[in-house]
Amino acid sequence: MDPVIITPDDVAEAVRWAPNWKSPGLDGLHHYWQKGFVVCHALLARQFQEAPDQTSLPSLFTTGITHLVPIDRDTVAPSKYRPITCLPTIYKTLTSIMSARITRHLNSNQVMSRAKNGSRGGGRGTKEPLLIDAVIGKVVKRNRRNLSAAWIDYKKAFDSVPHTWLKRVLELYKVDCTVRYFLGQCMG
């Protein structure tokens, strides 16, 4: 992967698709304002370019506001709550830029299989495999054939992947070492 050079266009692209009024983190900044103050994109790009080279990230980037949302009506047990953390908008913008660069690298080198639709940006997630399963089921029924199938549900799969493995995968896919270091700092 070529070294990442963050431009004002990258900042504009990252905020273009971000929801305007989603709950911000400690910075209190909504994406609406990042979209509107285009003059700030050059300054943000310069600061974002410097962020991966820092030995540690400022706490403003990685500290969020956590809200406990009840899962059901039984609100006595702590296990009946789901924690939702609102991360700072600046952090979301920077990681969105990094994600776009990694995705561009993976696509240009054809690293991701088309079958990995749920992991790809712009993919339809599980909808496409479900449609394929439905069609196969109808063909099997119409032709009076037998079919054996198994589905594996990885509940919260992304929460259970060790950070060491994520770092190793980034290394295997030859993601820029500065981006790998930055993401390692974020994971810490």
Image (spheres, grey):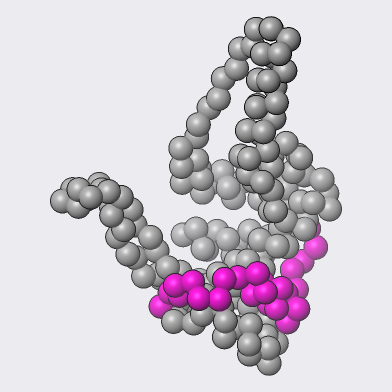
Question: Does 139 appear above or below 51?
Answer: above
Q: Residue 89 at x, y = what percent? A: 52, 75
In the image: residue 45, left or right of residue 32:
right
Q: Nearer the viewer, residue 51 or 40?
A: 40
Question: Does 96 appear above or below 41?
Answer: above
In the image: residue 39, left or right of residue 114:
left
Q: Nearer the viewer, residue 126 or 154?
A: 126
Q: Residue 99 at x, y = what percent? A: 66, 61
**Image quadrant assignment for residue 101:** bottom right
Q: Residue 77 at x, y = what percent? A: 18, 48
In the image: residue 151, left or right of residue 76:
right
What secondary structure predominates along the stretch shown in magenta?
A: loop
Picture residue at 28% right of the left edge, 54% below the top? 70
Instruction: Check the picture and name the quadrant holding the N terminus.
Output: bottom right
Q: Is residue 15 magenta?
A: yes
How many marks are shown on the rendered structure? 0
Q: Which residues are magenta?
A: 1-26
Q: Quick one: which residue is furthest to the front in this view?
A: 142
Q: Residue 84 at x, y = what percent? A: 38, 60
Picture residue at 51% right of the left edge, 45% below the top? 158
Q: Nearer the viewer, residue 31 or 107?
A: 31
**Image quadrant assignment for residue 179:** bottom right
Q: Is residue 72 visible?
A: yes
